Image: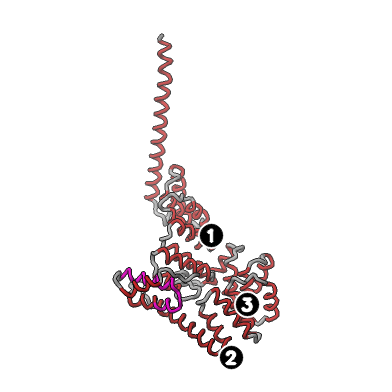
Amino acid sequence: MADRKNRRRIPILLLILFGFVVVSVQGFFLWRARDLDGTILQISPATDLRQLRDLAERLAWYRPADVDLMFRRAEYADQAGDSEVAAAILHGVPESSPQAGRARYLEGLVHRNAYRLDSAEQAFREALRIDPRMLEAHRALVGLLGVERRRADQLQALQAWVKSGFGTIEPLRLLGQSVVVIPPGTLDKSTDEGAVLEKALKVQPESRHIRPAYARFLRNRGESDLAIEKLTEWLSRNPDDVAARIELFATYVESGEIEKADKLVQEFGTAGADSPEYWMTLGDHQRNIGRREDSAKSYKKALALDPYHPETNYRLAESLRASGKTEEAAGILKTHETIRNLAETVAAVDSSRPTVMAILAAAKASASLGRSFEARAWATEALRIDRNNAEARAVVSRLAEKSNGP
C-alpha cells in the first residue's frame, strides 16, 4: 500500500521539478538578456565597436524578434564595414512591424553608400510600397534615378511622390524643370555623379542602369573613346540592352562617326521606337548629314513621347527654320520659352515658406502648357495655405478630371 502511494508521488514530483527547471531556464534567459543589454549600453561605441557588435549578436540569440535590437545590430555591422550583413539584418525586419518601412529605407541607404545602386533602388521602392508617405524614401529614390539619368522612371517617381500628398512642393519644383534632375543634397559636395557611377559599376558590373549613365558622363566630359569602349564591350555580351545601344548611338553622333551611326540605325529596327532619347539622337544624326526635314520628323516623334523636353523643342524649331518653315518654327520656339519660364517660376517657390502668390504663378505656368496634373497639384497646395482662395479653387475645379501623363 505504501509502495503504491510512493509511485503516485513520483510523477507529481517530476512535474514539479520540470516546472521548476522551465521557470529557472526562462528566468536565466531573461536575466542573461538584460545583463547583455545593460552591458551594451555601458560600452562606448567609439572604442569598443567589436565588443558591442559581439554582445549584440549574442543578445539576438535571446531576442531574435526584437526589432529595435535588429536596428542596433545593423548599425554596428555597418560601422564595422560589413554593409552586406547590415542590409541583410534590416531586410529581416518583418513587414508586419510598424518599423518595416523605415527598415527598408535604411537598407536602401546602406546599399547606396556601398554603391550597390540596383539593390538600393529595390529597397527604396519597397519602403514606399509599405509607407507611400515616407519623404526620405521618395527623395532618395528620385535622387538615385537622377544620377542614373533615367528620365521616364524619375518622372513616374516624382508623380507618385506628388500623389502621396506629403512634401508635395519639392517634387513639383523638380517636375517643373522638365528634364532629368539630380536634386540638391543627392551627392556629397566632394564628389560628382561620375565618381559615384564608376564605383557603382565596379560593385555591380552587370547592372543595366549604371553603364549607360556612366558612358554618358564620359561623353559629356570629352572621353568619347572610353565611353565607346565600355559600351561596345558590354553590348557584345548584351545586344538586347536598348539603353546602352542608344547611348552608343549618341556617342557616335556627337563624335562625327557618321558611318558607324548609320550602321547602328539599321541595326535598331523598331527597338528604340518607345524611347524619346533614340528619336532625338536620330534627329541630331539626320541634321548633321543635312536631312533637315527628316530630323524634324524625328524630333516630333521624340516630343510625342516627352512633349516638354526643352532641348528637343529647341532643336525641332531649328530644323523647321532651316527647312523654311519659319511660322511653325516660331510656334515651337514659343513653347520652348514657355517651358523655360515654367522652370524659372517653380524654382522661385520657396519649399520651406511658400506663398500663395508664388504657388498660383506655378499653377498658371503649368496650365499654360497643358500640364493639368501639376497645375491642379499646385493649386491644391495653395488651398492648404488659404482654403478660401477663390482662384485656387477655380483651378482645382476646372482641372479635376484632367491630368498630364508621364
Write down the residue under mark 1: 119
Q: Which residues are magenta?
A: 364-385
Q: Is residue 160 above or below residue 328?
A: above
The residue sitting at 63% across, 85% down in the picture is: 288
- Expressed as whole percent of the image width and height from the top left, the position of residue 84 reads 53, 55
- Picture quadrant where residue 321 is located: bottom right
Q: Mark 3 Cα within 10 Å, few/some/many (few <14, many 20+)?
A: many
Q: Mark 2 Cα within 10 Å, few/some/many (few <14, many 20+)?
A: few
Q: In the rendered structure, does residue 221 fall within the stretch colored magenta?
A: no
In the shown orientation, is residue 148 left or right of residue 69?
right
Q: Mark 1 Cα within 10 Å, few/some/many (few <14, many 20+)?
A: some
Residue 251, label in figure? 3
In the shown orientation, is residue 216 left or right of residue 171?
right
The N terminus appears in which quarter of the rendering? top left
Q: Tag 2, which secondary structure?
A: loop
Determine contact: label 1, label 2, CB under 8 Å. Answer: no
- Picture quadrant where residue 355 is located: bottom left
Q: As rendered, which of 262 and 302 lies closer to the eye?
A: 302
Amino acid beneath label 3: Thr
The residue sitting at 62% across, 73% down in the picture is: 246
Q: As rendered, which of 128 and 48 lies closer to the eye?
A: 128
Write down the residue under mark 2: 324
- Picture quadrant where residue 171 is located: bottom left
- Expressed as whole percent of the image width and height from the top left, the position of residue 95 reads 46, 51
The residue sitting at 48% across, 73% down in the picture is: 181
- Expressed as whole percent of the image width and height from the top left, the position of residue 307 reads 52, 76
Amino acid beneath label 2: Gly
**Distance between mark 2 and mark 3 Cα atoms:** 29 Å
